[in-house]
Amino acid sequence: MQYKNVLLCSTLALLFIITAYAQNTSEAEALYAKAEQAYEAKNFEEAGDLFAKSYQTAEPESRVAQYASFNAGCSYALAKDKKNANRYAAIAYEKGMFQFETDKDFDYIRNTRKFKKLLKAANEELETLKSGASLMPKTYLPSTYNKDEAAPLMVLLHGYGDNPTNMIELYKPLAESKGLVLMACRASEISGRNSFYWDFENRKAIDKIRKHIESIVGRFNIDKDNIILSGFSQGGYLCYDFGLKNADLFKGLMPVAGSIPKEITLSPNAKKDLKLFAFVGLKESKKFLDAYENLDDQLDEMEVPYYLHYSNVGHKYPDNTQEALIMAFDWLMQE
């Protein structure tokens, strides 16, 4: 079973996406937690039944439904229930999960005809997602875009388990309001069909963000003096890490729920008008918030103007997301 403590992961990384169906999600989470306990106690048949109930209770497109179906398949395989193991493995694949090859929990059904067929399809799709075409960023042109007029650009970096499409949808109202071109980059690491994450050690993949920016500047009429980098969670971390290291590209950085790297470095050729506006939740962990105590001094030393916007939320966007994004954008664009 690869998805232990998934509720913590999904809540932290994707809470800003999941806003409806709170009652169903709560019940599904409770069942999921009980299933984990049964799994840890090696009561695999009980675990399978509980994971299956969690899947059946959860909102169909939720992360809980994805992981519960996968773990139901794992548990039933360990309980030597071939029928239900194959059934829930197939559901998990339909929900966008791929990690069947490496999970030993499936060994009992690995040689069955149904599982072999599923594994072949999953591996083929996984290879496609690793290809160059799938790694290309998503773009969005506002309805007011005019190829004869240079438009500001906002580069978006998603968080753990998310994808560029969700980021584009979240920032569309801002783009329409301010005439922004949007470009959302996809992380290199794959956790599901529409679920990706950044490996901060994979500098080659992260450095491609710069190439993508240079490419879109060449494709569209972009105002090079008005490019802003924004990201959530892992993407927020990269606003500090990648954004400051490549500050010659950006007028502004807008991290949301981004942790602070141990060391932040400002590129020597940074734009002189570079500014940073950060969204921080007061309900984040103490360790997370403590890192922000030192950020003021670091940015002052770099002579980077900043605005730290604290709100009474956890690891998510502010409740008034669209108004908050407009406020941050306006502040970053001020001369």
Image (spheres, helix red, strand yellow):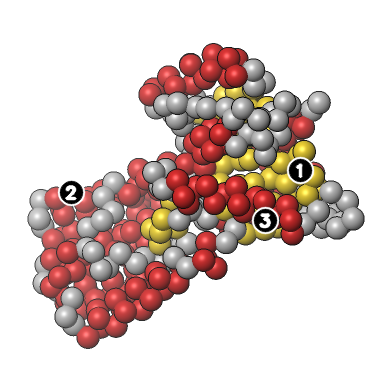
* Residue at the disc numbered 1: 224
Tell me if label 2 and label 1 are in contact, CB under 8 Å: no
Q: Earlier in the sequence, mark 2 or mark 3?
A: 2
Q: Is residue 328 left or right of residue 67?
A: right
Q: Secondary structure at mark 2?
A: helix
Q: Residue at x 22, y 63 (%)?
A: 103
The label shown at residue 180 is none
**Vertical placement of 34 versus 129: above or below?**
above
- Residue at image point 54% right, 51% down: 208
- The answer to whether residue 131 is seen in the rendering is yes
- Mark 3 = which residue? 215
Q: Which mark is residue 37?
A: 2
Q: Amino acid at mark 2?
A: Gln
Q: Position of residue 50 (x, y in %)?
A: 23, 59
Dot 3 or dot 1, earlier in sequence? 3
**Spatial separation of the CA atoms under disc 2 and disc 3:** 49 Å
Kind of residue indicated by mark 1: Lys
